[in-house]
Amino acid sequence: MQYNGDAPTERTPNWRTRLLSAQRWSGVLLSGYAIALLTGTHIPNPEGFFPIEGNDKWLHFCAYFGLAFLIATWRSRTRPIGIKLTLGVWLITAFVGATDELTQQLPGINRHCDFSDWIADTSGSACGLLVWHLLRWTLFAERRSVKLQNDAVQE
């Protein structure tokens, strides 16, 4: 709290508090991201519209990195993300990636199913979850140490 002369006032929330309050919007962001991802991968692709030169693996990697990261952020609102939930998120994104690749073979879409695209999808998901856990661990390490110190004082 800060003192402004008459009465104490609340300080502006620190970045951790803002990060936690922004987590509220993760469901909306995830929904928009998933719709854009699935729509973008199923729009008919005329040749030359989005030239990739045959190597679009980084696009797949980045797209599913973001998807897994957003799912983990959204799920962390209601429960802690442990090993089982991390594996569940990865399996869900792997299934979505496989379904995405298989449905691109539908007539009129002018795309093809590629196993290496799916590998890029699942690799991106795994890396997105790894980065999510590392960021979460790093950003909230101070709070864990304070909690551990408080637990030691109470004993």
Image (spheres, helix red, strand yellow):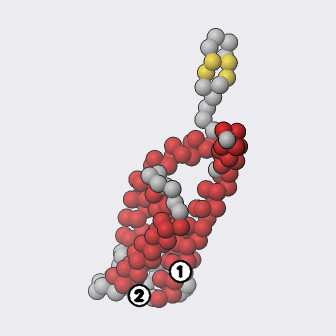
Percent of width and height locating residue 116? 51, 87
38 lies above or below 110: above
Give the left or right position of residue 72, taking residue 102 as reference: right
Residue at position x 37%, y 79% from top? Answer: 99
- Identify the amino acid type marked 1: Ala
Tell me if residue 101 can be seen.
yes
* Numbered badge on residue 113: 2
Front position among marks 1 and 2: 1
Cα separation between marks 1 and 2 = 13 Å
Q: Nearer the viewer, residue 15 or 49?
A: 15
Percent of width and height locating residue 40? 40, 71
Percent of width and height locating residue 36? 40, 65
Q: Residues within 10 Å of mark 1 (few under 14, many from 20)?
A: many
93 lies above or below 8: below
Question: Which residue reaches farthest front?
Answer: 155
Residue where numbered disc 1 is placed:
120
Q: Earlier in the sequence, mark 1 or mark 2?
A: 2
Q: Nearer the viewer, residue 144 or 93?
A: 144
Quarter of the picture containing the N terminus is: top right
Percent of width and height locating residue 46? 39, 82
52 lies above or below 40: below
Tell me if residue 104 can be seen.
no
Residue at position x 47%, y 88% from top? Answer: 115
Please count the marks in the image.
2
